[in-house]
Amino acid sequence: MEQTWTKPLAAIKRSKSYKAIAASLWEANPISKQILGICSALAVTVQLKTAIVMSLALTLVVAVSSFVISCIRNLIPRNIRIIVEISIIATLVIIADELLKAFMYDVSKQLSVFVGLIITNCIVLGRAEGYALANPPIPSFVDGLANGIGYGSILIGVAFIRELLGSGKLLGISVIPSAFYAAGYENMGLMVLAPGAFIVIGLFVWLQHTLIRK
Amino acid sequence: MENLMSIGINSVFVGNILLAYFLGMCSFLALSKNIKTATGLGVAVVFVLTITTPANWLIYRFLLAPGALAWAGLPATDLSFLKLVLFIAVIAAIVQALEMVIDRYSPALYSALGVFLPLITVNCAILGTSLFMVERDYVFPESIVFGFGSGAGWCLAIVAMAAIQQKLRYADIPEGLQGFGINMITTGLMAIGFMLFAGISL
């Protein structure tokens, strides 16, 4: 019984995609280790919902842009590669932005300019420059996906803490029982404000760096 | 006039593009190790923002906004979805052109700013300011003041951060917190400081 369970698991663990995703979740996390794409990570984490939508949008853009850029990597002249990459990324971001406006209008209003700013998010251009230009399409796609997931993991973690402590809710549903408030518990106003984001990420990274060393 | 003043002051302090809206963090973290580099980059950002924000305003107003193409006989066209692509192209083009102009007419300034200019294209503070300008419906003079103010606020933040980091070199920071961690917490404390300006109204 045990063998049938462990065998496919071990096979998955040996595969390249698993390794890429595991690495970018922890040791080579784009935000906390490579320090890329911080801007949006801070801005959209007041609520869990916006953070999840933003992670999905970014993952989609990184994965597809890496795939496309990798497909045409041999056709891009070296001197103008940045502008080509940016145009591909910008096109994908516009698609993501229009999709959000069409199907999730409220969230798109809350995310305001930050969906557009995926264009200048260093993760996307960084993966295009650093990986997609030198590797075939499928691994590039997986690499983009892995980095998107790594980025999302931090975003969702930070948003979880900020929404829980800042407004006592998760995904817009109150989770702190009202008895707590009656007993004198108060929401932490700092978490909702800008400085809260900086401090939570700082502490997050502290924890992660300490754990990795051990 | 008063309106312009308040937009200017607001974009430097209360609505600081870096500390309140988190834009331009990547270069902020990467280049705030010494004051000289930080000042160079800060001045370059002020320069580029003051030019690109009004330029993008003109493009948006006369080409992209709903009904903007009325002068060309197309009053029903709405091209505003193209703003992302066009804004980033305008920014890249202006940065490139600026680099050449500065190189030609002021080699001294070029050697001071030159290395930072290409980096600025991908600084999200630049694109972010243009997008905020559209979102908040500024008029032309307001867009100039907003561009300049955002740049000045960003410059102030990175220079202050560089100064703090130089002092922190002598501090005994826990091992896991060194580097990125402590920088984020310092920035958070700075953001709290800047928020105090919200109580001041002109």
Image (tube, rainbow, N blue to C red):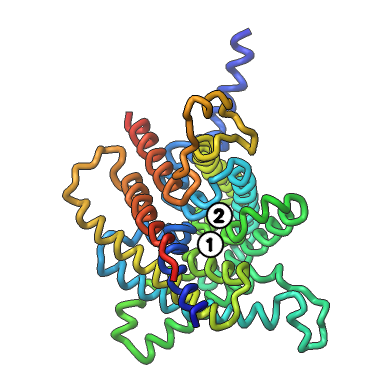
Q: Nearer the viewer, mark 2 or mark 1?
A: 1
Residue type highlighted by circle 1: Thr
Is B4 located above or below residue A36 in the figure?
below
Residue B117 x %, y % = 41, 74
Q: Nearer the viewer, residue A131 or A198?
A: A198
Chain ID of residue with mark 1: A
> Which residue of the protein is positioned furthest toward the left in this rendering?
B170
Residue B147 x %, y % = 49, 75
Q: Nearer the viewer, residue A150 or A145?
A: A150
Q: Nearer the viewer, residue A152 or A85?
A: A152
Q: Quadrant of residue B195?
A: bottom left
Q: Circle 2 — which element?
A: helix
- Which numbered dot is residue A120? 1
Q: Give left or right: position of A98 versus A187.
A: right
Is B105 located above or below residue A70 in the figure?
below
Q: Nearer the viewer, residue A28 or B52?
A: B52
Residue that mark 2 sits on: A132
